[in-house]
Amino acid sequence: MAYQLDAHHAPVDSSVPLEYATEDGSLKILGFWIFLAADVVLFSCLFATYIVLQHNTYGGPTAQQLFDVPGFVTETLLLLTSSFTCGLAIFEMHRNRLQPMIGWWIVTILLGMGFVGMEISEFAKYVGEGANITRSAFLSAFFILVGTHGTHVTIGIFWMLGLLVQLLRYGITAITARKAFVASLYWHFLDAVWIFIFTVVYLTGKVS
Amino acid sequence: MLPHYFNHLFVTGTDIYIADVLIILTSLGIVGVLTYFKKWKWLWREWLTTVDHKKIGIMYIIAATAMFFRGGMDGLMMRTQLAVPNNHFLGAEHYDQVFTTHGTIMILFMAMPYLIGLINVAMPLQIGARDVAFPYLNAISFWTFFFGAMLFNLSFVIGGSPDAGWTSYAPLAGPTFDPGPGENYYLFGLNLAGIGTLASGINFLVTIIKMRAPGMKLMDMPMFTWSTLITSILIIFAFPVLTVALSLLTFDRLFGSHIFSMTHGGMPMMWVNLFWIWGHPEVYIVILPAFGILSEVISTFSGKKLFGYSAMVGSMVAIAFLSFTVWVHHFFTMGAGPAVNSFFGVSTMLIAIPTGVKVFNWIFTMYRGKIRFTTAMLWALAFIPTFVVGGMTGVMLAVAPADYQYHNSYFLIAHFHYTLIGGTVFGVFAGLYYWWPKMFGFKLNERLGRWNFWTFIISFNVTFLPMFLLGLMGMTRRMYTYPPGLGWSHLNMIETVGAFGQAIGMMFLAVNIVWSIKYGERDVTGDAWDGRALEWSTTSPAPEYNFAHVPVVYGRDAFWDMKYGKNREKYQVKAKPYRPIHMPNNSGRPFLMSLAFFISFWGFVFKWYLVGGLGLAAVFVFMYLRSFEYDTDHYISVEEIEHTEAAAGRL
């Protein structure tokens, strides 16, 4: 194993991908995987709550009446594409090409913003129709489950914006690579959660 | 919104005024002492900004002790109220608040931080690490716990305490039946502390997986470290469930959603399920580390290696797995039907098997050992029979048809006090006496320790043994008073006497600490008890970097092996020259960020959304500042290491 020192004087192991190259980096990546496991539990509970309450509409609008197919399909496409472009950014990072990495990074952020924007307008539309969080247990569970995911995405956008500044400032180093890699794990995770929301909430809601 | 709450902001009542005065006097006293001795800078530099696991552990233990005092006062108030029939020392509403805060504080702000504190103190040393994996996050864990506990306690004087029980069942705890800020304090206080607990779980797990000393395999780890590993996994999978449950109830209370309502299609039982899916693993989160402490203490003071090491590990894994499959036993009386109740009854009884394995292994560890009856060992010895009583009555409660008789009676109260005090608290005391010299460099006095032990253990049984009988005689929990002539009066009086006896027992501990600070036997060797694991191989207290050289390990009980074992020669390798040691910088941000959380959540408690929002914004600013911080650590120079080691006489 060839060792060198990065700007931060920590030993760097060049036999592994850059994000794992410092001891601190590999610890943080493992820690983040474990955090994601905890987040899986969090979403599982919200899904369970939604599944239990989804038919308790209390005379209010049902899922079938509410959901708009082109809307949620567009949201899905935006988010899935952003996950792909995020993967491209990390791919370029591994090839040590800063410019294309930053390019894909920005595309990811923009797609994420598009997703959040659409979700906000979707929520606003429902509320405008009187289908707000206080209307029925179904709507409470819907807004909390989908809103928790949307909040995660929003936090992810601010996170990636912060990292964008750091990438521009420091380039691709063991530290920025680790940070970008961890953010990408988070982003892919949210994508996976959305696939479940798409299936369990929207598709099932539309057909049942 | 604001004026409505303003009228009721400050709670009134004689005891509250006394509390107000005491809080103000204590605060003034602390400020006065710090100012008089010019200790502000010292407090900030050495403690509030520290990321050192040993200091964070000590702060956890101090905070837990304060919370033990608060929860104990609640207990004494309840016992005073129940001492005689038809008593009106506390009113019904007030009694509700006191049992709610007693339960919540004792489990979440006493038992857990005591154990997390001891884990912080001992676990990294046991595996030969220089700190935990994420020292900065460790500081955040502590401060979010601390401010969560402070937020919860603030309810006593500002706004009113929660009063729906520590289980906070919906719909009783919902906005319809329990308006006012009390329950909000419960929800936000616990959620804030929960952030820290989850972070601790992740931190300890990564530390144990990745940072063990070279040569130390998983099956070489000390049993306390094993218990920490299993507990961390339980925390990671259980605490998000609590977060969800608390957040959903928060939405119901603040924003009018209907998850747990009686109307609009809500489902109150969903709260009960979520709460106990967290709540049952939680009781193992607070008992497994105590099992770990017990294994260390019994093995050390028997002078023998732990009997049945692999069985000990396997039984903990089994307990951890089963702990997620038993939650319905907390509400058999919900009427889920014979099939469901049978499943959960049987899975509950199954836990008795691995627990029994552990009990026998502790006994076999002592068999033919040279037992030293130190105070730590006395607590460990008392643990076994007390916990067996708690466990056996737990199996009785697991018999679903019989549970219809015991449910929510004092039989249940006696059962869980035998496990939580006889298990967790005795384990914590064993751990405190055992690791005290490692934390502070001096031993607690053994004579005062025995007074502490005997008064407490006798009083404990005087308090809680009669509760089994009272439960069988029909006294239910949470009743604030009872009429004479039911045959309950004598037993209740006996219990109250016992409760005050326990308080006296605790006074001996306080006296012991004060006495030992001045006169206690100093530990100059670092090996106060002729110990077996690596924490005893460094000085007491350990230096900032824990080990000047990271130890290389050749098997279980590494330090014992080093002193007396077959690998003695291998450990005697010539000391290499010191190398600079990489350590994290201190930071005030974990403290300030948690303070921002505290202010934000306090705003949300009163639905002051501006305060809440600004506080959260501040939290995010602190997170951003951390992300942009690149100068996060430093090196300890060789000269400094040589200086420290020479001062400890280890060069």
Image (cartoon, coloured by chain):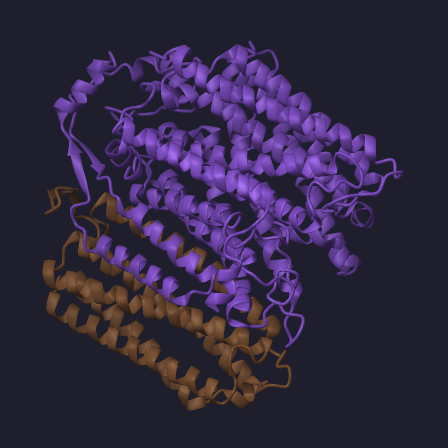
Chain colours: A brown, B purple
Q: Is residue B527 above or below residue A86?
A: above
Q: Quadrant of the C terminus of chain B?
A: top left
Q: Quadrant of residue B462?
A: top right
**Can you give x and y, in whole percent of width and height, for residue B442 in the image?**
39, 15
The answer to whether residue B213 shows anywhere in this view is: no
Q: Nearer the viewer, residue B312 or B424?
A: B424
What number of labels is visible? 0
Q: Which residue corresponds to the image point at 54% horizontal and 82% vertical from the top-left?
A: A205
Instruction: Please indicate whether residue B96 sits to the left or right of residue B24 in the image.
Output: right
Q: Is residue B285 above or below residue B57?
A: below
Q: Residue furthest right?
A: B485
Q: Which residue corresponds to the image point at 45% horizontal and 14% vertical from the top-left?
A: B515
Q: Is residue A56 above or below residue B466?
A: below
Q: Nearer the viewer, residue B22 or B535?
A: B22
The answer to whether residue B200 shows anywhere in this view is: yes
Instruction: Please indicate whether residue B130 sits to the left or right of residue B28 in the image.
Output: left
**Can you give x and y, in whole percent of width and height, for residue B409 in the image?**
77, 44
**Can you give x and y, in whole percent of width and height, for residue B324 in the image?**
59, 50
Instruction: Please indicate whether residue A193 sits to the left or right of residue B546 in the image.
Output: right
Q: Quadrant of residue B88?
A: top right
Q: Nearer the viewer, residue B382 or A76?
A: B382
**Can you give x and y, in whole percent of width and height, for residue B378 in the image?**
59, 17
Q: Which residue corresponds to the image point at 12% horizontal and 65% vertical from the top-left?
A: A98
Q: Which residue corresponds to the image point at 51% horizontal and 34% vertical from the top-left?
A: B289
